[in-house]
Image (cartoon, coloured by chain):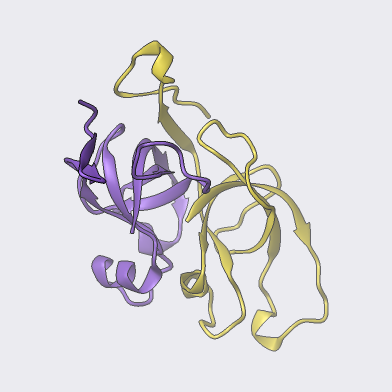
């Protein structure tokens, strides 16, 4: 799993049927300390009722995500699976900023 | 899964039989500001995309599930047309909610 921040919502009126009724979020991957990771912007299905600005857990591994969404033949690879309350790194709380 | 813009297409007459009928498009990944980022890729098209479209690309093994035959060597497929991409306002403006909706 990756750590990320929700930076937006994505609306796709024309889409594969597997995405019907699913909310899509744009997620910027972060390092644990909160800095931006050297990675591309992700589009992920929302499974945690996350909103813009939330620090989230991003599952970016296909078979796990297909199990979560309940469709083993869905072309879906990424999902937001949790909203992060706190991150501790080397014994220090780095999120939320204190 | 990523955002991208269709910048071209690839024609390949000789191809594996499982790939017959699939359309190959060249996609440039985009960041949240709709600026190009990362390496350009070739993706199959499952939703009827055209040049200039902002699209949602599924990569990896899952990309083949959008095609007719799930046993083909494909690692990226366009699975949606992005009509609207609302992203948060830059931190300098202090906005919290979604803003900057465009297109």
Image location of residue A6, percent across then percent down: 34, 39
Q: Quadrant of residue B9?
A: bottom right
Image location of residue B22, percent across then percent down: 66, 72
Image location of residue A25, percent across then percent down: 36, 44
Figure check: A86 above or below B63? above
Q: Residue at x 58, y 70 (%)?
A: B75
Q: Residue at x 49, y 39 (%)?
A: B83
Asked if residue A85 lies left or right of residue A38, the reply is left
Number of marks drawn? 0
| Quadrant holding the N terminus of chain A | bottom left
Figure check: B8 above or below B35? below
Asked if residue B71 lies left or right of residue A91, the reply is right
Judging depth in this view, the residue of B28 and B55 nearest the camera is B28
Judging depth in this view, the residue of A52 and B82 nearest the camera is A52
Judging depth in this view, the residue of A60 and B79 nearest the camera is A60
Q: Residue at x 63, y 42 (%)?
A: B37
Image location of residue B59, percent across then percent down: 52, 64
Figure check: A58 above or below A34? below
Asked if residue B31 lies left or right of residue B20, the reply is left
* The colour assigned to chain B within the rendered structure: yellow
From the rendered image, report the letter of the chain displayed in purple.
Answer: A
Q: Residue furthest front?
A: A90
Judging depth in this view, the residue of A8 and B47 nearest the camera is A8
Q: Quadrant of residue A50?
A: top left
| Quadrant holding the C terminus of chain A | top left
Q: Residue furthest top?
A: B93
Q: Residue at x 37, y 64 (%)?
A: A18
């Amino acid at each position: 799993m990756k750590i990320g921040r929700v930076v937006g919502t994505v609306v796709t009126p024309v889409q594969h049927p597997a995405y019907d009724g699913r909310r899509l979020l744009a997620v910027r991957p972060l390092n644990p300390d909160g800095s931006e990771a050297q990675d591309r912007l992700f589009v992920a299905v929302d499974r945690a009722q996350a909103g813009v600005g939330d620090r989230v857990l991003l599952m970016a591994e296909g078979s796990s995500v297909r199990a979560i969404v309940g469709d083993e033949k869905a072309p879906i690879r990424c999902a937001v699976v949790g909203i992060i309350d706190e991150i501790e790194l080397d014994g220090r709380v780095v999120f939320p900023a204190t | 899964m990523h955002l991208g813009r269709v910048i071209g297409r690839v024609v390949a007459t000789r191809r594996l039989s499982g790939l017959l009928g699939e359309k190959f498009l060249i996609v440039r990944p985009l960041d949240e500001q709709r600026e190009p980022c990362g390496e350009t890729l070739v993706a199959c098209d499952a939703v009827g995309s055209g040049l200039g479209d902002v699209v949602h690309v599924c990569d990896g093994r899952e990309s083949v599930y959008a095609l007719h035959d799930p046993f083909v060597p494909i690692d990226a497929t366009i699975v949606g047309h992005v009509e609207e991409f609302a992203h948060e306002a830059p931190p300098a403006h202090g906005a919290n909610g979604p803003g900057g909706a465009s297109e």
